[in-house]
Amino acid sequence: MQIYDPYLQNLRKTDIAYIKIKDMILNGEIKPGEIISSYKLSECIKLTRTPITNALKKLEQEGIIEIIPQVGCTIKMPDLNTIMEDMKIRACLEALACEMACKNATLDDINELNLIIQENEKCDENSLFNTNSKYNEMFHYKIIEMANMPNLKNMILSFWNNIIYRAISVDFVNERVEISVTEHKKILEAFENKDCSLARTLMESHLKKCSDDYLKKDVFEL
């Protein structure tokens, strides 16, 4: 049964299709490398093929998917060298944010980070992706906010908001719950000790390790 959404009711069918297909990509319902047809999407979303086709064209223009004539569409895989470069940049940017956040950290901030970790610790690889992702993003976002550097924040979020990277991270997030929680705890401990240099080093190491593991995924061999 579909839940009534007044926001969607006021949109054109093409816009509804666009939003729902994007959600399917982010939620892992459409996997990287999987070929999916407009017919199948039409059945899933309960819309005719015309708005589906229009939505797919828009997603292709944004560089999110690739349309293969007479076959279907698939998530457009980024160039491996581009991914490697972007991840190294993100690691450096978030490491700086972590150092500045440590300098600004209040007891309330530290308590909030600890609570996020505790909630994330309850998750495992059998938990819903959105649950694992939520707490992971909350931890990193809180640190970025604590840095109080708006320009730095915007640069970091530009990497976060890349829908292709998020789509190919779905399974990866679940697989690394225990590792991420352990590494987040070490960063929090550095905050508690006001060891800002160590906090920066740990964050950079954490993200570089994530990048290394991320790049080993089979999806990049497709």
Image: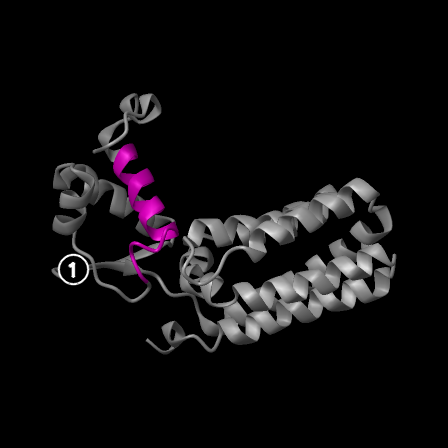
Q: Quadrant of the N terminus?
A: top left
Residue 202 occupies quadrant:
bottom right
| Residue bearing the label numbered 1 | 69
Residue 3's x, y, as percent?
28, 29
**Percent x, y of residue 106:** 83, 43
Q: How many marks?
A: 1
Q: Amino acid at mark 1?
A: Pro
Examine the structure image and report whether residue 144 is included in the region drawn in magenta.
no
Question: Which percent across, then down, holds residue 41?
Answer: 18, 47
Give the residue at x 34% y 52%: 25
Residue 126's image quarter? bottom left
Which scheme is used to colour this image of the protein? one colour
Q: Is residue 74 above or below residue 101?
A: below
What stretch of residues is rendered in magenta?
15-31
Q: Position of residue 142 (x, y in %)?
A: 68, 46
* Quarter in which the C terminus is drawn: bottom left
Left or right: residue 44 versus residue 145 is: left
Please check the rendered image and state whether residue 22 is part of the magenta-colored stretch, yes or no: yes
Crowd band around label 1 with a 10 angstrom C-alpha radius: few (<14), some (14–19), many (20+): few
The kind of secondary structure the magenta stretch mainly shows is: helix
Front residue of this view, candidates 172 and 47: 172
Question: As rendered, which of 136 and 127 lies closer to the eye?
Answer: 127
Farthest front residue in view: 122
- Residue occupying image coordinates x 38% and y 65%: 77
Q: Secondary structure at mark 1?
A: loop
Q: Residue at x 87, y 61 (%)?
A: 195
Q: Kindly identify the residue that appears in the image at 86 percent across and 51 percent down.
A: 103
Q: Is residue 89 visible?
A: no
From where the camera sits, is residue 122 visible? Answer: yes
